[in-house]
Image (cartoon, grey):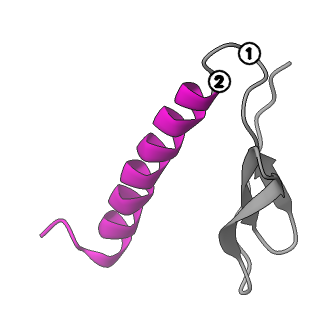
Amino acid sequence: MGFNVTCSPGKDATAGLVMVTPELPTLILYLDPVNLAIQLPAFPNGAQVLTRFCRELSREAARVADAIDGGDK
C-alpha cells in the first residue's frame, strides 16, 4: 500500500528515536500536529533497508537545510 502526503512542520515539530520494544527502534517525526512513525520493515533484511533509508534521509535533510540557510555557499 502506498500513499503520498505533504506536510509542513509546525512551531513545535521535532524528530526522535522511540524504542517500541528492545528490538524495534522507530523513527518518529512529530510534525505538530501530524505524527509519522517509520519502523523496521517486516521482511528479510528489513534492518538493512531501514538503515540505508535513515542514512539517505539524514543526507537529504542536511541538503534541504543547507539550501534554506545558504550552507552550500
Instruction: State the image coordinates of residue 39 (x, y, percent, origin top left).
Output: 76, 41
Q: Is residue 44 above or below residue 40?
A: above
Furthest residue to the front?
22
Relative to residue 25, is residue 47 drawn left or right?
Answer: left
In the picture, measured across the screen, residue 53 lies left or right of residue 13, that is: left
The picture places residue 3, in percent across and down from the top left corner, at 81, 29
* Element type where label 2 sits in the image: helix
Quadrant position of residue 58: bottom left
Q: CA distance from mark 2 to mark 1?
A: 5 Å
Q: Residue at x 53, y 27 (%)?
A: 48
Q: Judging from the image, what secondary structure is the residue with disc 1 in?
A: loop
Q: Residue 61 magenta-drawn? A: yes
Q: Nearer the viewer, residue 12 or 54?
A: 54
Span shown in magenta: 47-73
Location of residue 68 (image quadrant): bottom left
Q: Can see residue 6?
A: no
**Contact (Cβ within 8 Å) of mark 2 with mark 1:** yes
Residue at screen point 18% across, 65% down? 72
Residue 70 vertical placement versus 36 (above, below): below
Q: Amino acid at mark 2?
A: Gly
The residue to which callout 1 is attached is 43
What's the residue at 33%, 57% (across, down)?
63
Q: Position of residue 12 (x, y in %)?
A: 74, 85
* Mark 1: amino acid: Phe
Q: Nearer the viewer, residue 1 or 53?
A: 53
| Residue 73 % position (x, y) | 12, 70
Q: Is most of the magenta stretch helix, strand or loop?
A: helix
Left or right of 65? Residue 11 is: right
Residue highlighted by disc 2: 46
